[in-house]
Image (cartoon, grey):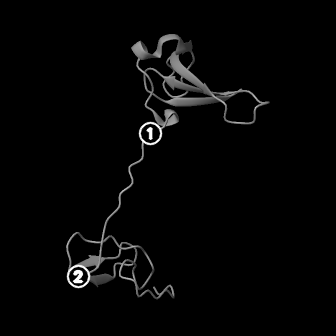
Amino acid sequence: MSLGFVSQDGEFCGFCGTILSLPLNAPAQVECKVCSTKWLIKEKNEELVCRVEKIYERTVADTDGMDTEDAGDSLVDHICSKCGHGKASYSTMQTRSADEGQTVFYTCLKCKKKDIEYS
């Protein structure tokens, strides 16, 4: 299964080019998740090595919905497309150009399914 990739970098599989998951301690042996080739990861002396993780925050569109106490005036009659419940909370957002209507995001109060209505 040669893909014609040759890598001298220890962070990539030298056979298929897949990024290798680096171990916490070296020397260690890691296995490529794509081609199952095993690679020896050597320790790096006098070289700064760090691991960076990005933590993403949820946005308003990604939230699980509001509870009925927090929803306040944003409760409306809306039939859920998943469970058929008749109440939902909603929010609006301008997702297209200014001369077009707002997009309405409905969240079912029972199953938390999100429906979108383009006005």
Residue 8 position, x and y percent, is 41, 88
Element type where label 2 sits in the image: loop
Q: Which residue is mark 1?
A: 58
Say above or below: 101 vs 73.
Answer: below
Element type where label 1 sits in the image: loop
Which of pointers 2 and 1 indicates the residue nearer the eye?
A: 2
Q: Residue at x 42, y 47 (%)?
A: 56
Say above or below: 3 vs 103.
Answer: below
- Badge 2: residue crowd in 10 Å (few <14, some 14–19, many ≥20): few
| Amino acid on which the number 2 mark rests in the picture | Glu
Q: Residue at x 46, y 88 (%)?
A: 6
Question: Along the line of sight, which residue is nearer the eye, 67 or 84?
Answer: 67
| Amino acid on which the number 1 mark rests in the picture | Arg
Kindly give the residue lying farthest to the top in the view shown: 73
Quarter of the rendering containing residue 50: bottom left
Question: Along the line of sight, which residue is nearer the eye, 35 or 105?
Answer: 105
What is the number of the mark on residue 99?
none
Residue 67 position, x and y percent, is 40, 19
Q: Residue at x 67, y 31 (%)?
A: 94
Q: Earlier in the sequence, mark 2 or mark 1?
A: 2
Question: Along the line of sight, which residue is nearer the eye, 2 or 106?
Answer: 106
- Badge 1: residue crowd in 10 Å (few <14, some 14–19, many ≥20): few
* 94 sits to left or right of 12: right
Q: Quadrant of the C terminus?
A: top right
Residue 112 position, x and y percent, is 45, 27
Say above or below: 61 vs 10.
Answer: above
Quarter of the rendering containing residue 79: top right
Q: Disc 2, disc 1: CB below 8 Å?
A: no
What is the number of the mark on residue 43?
2
Residue 110 position, x and y percent, is 43, 21
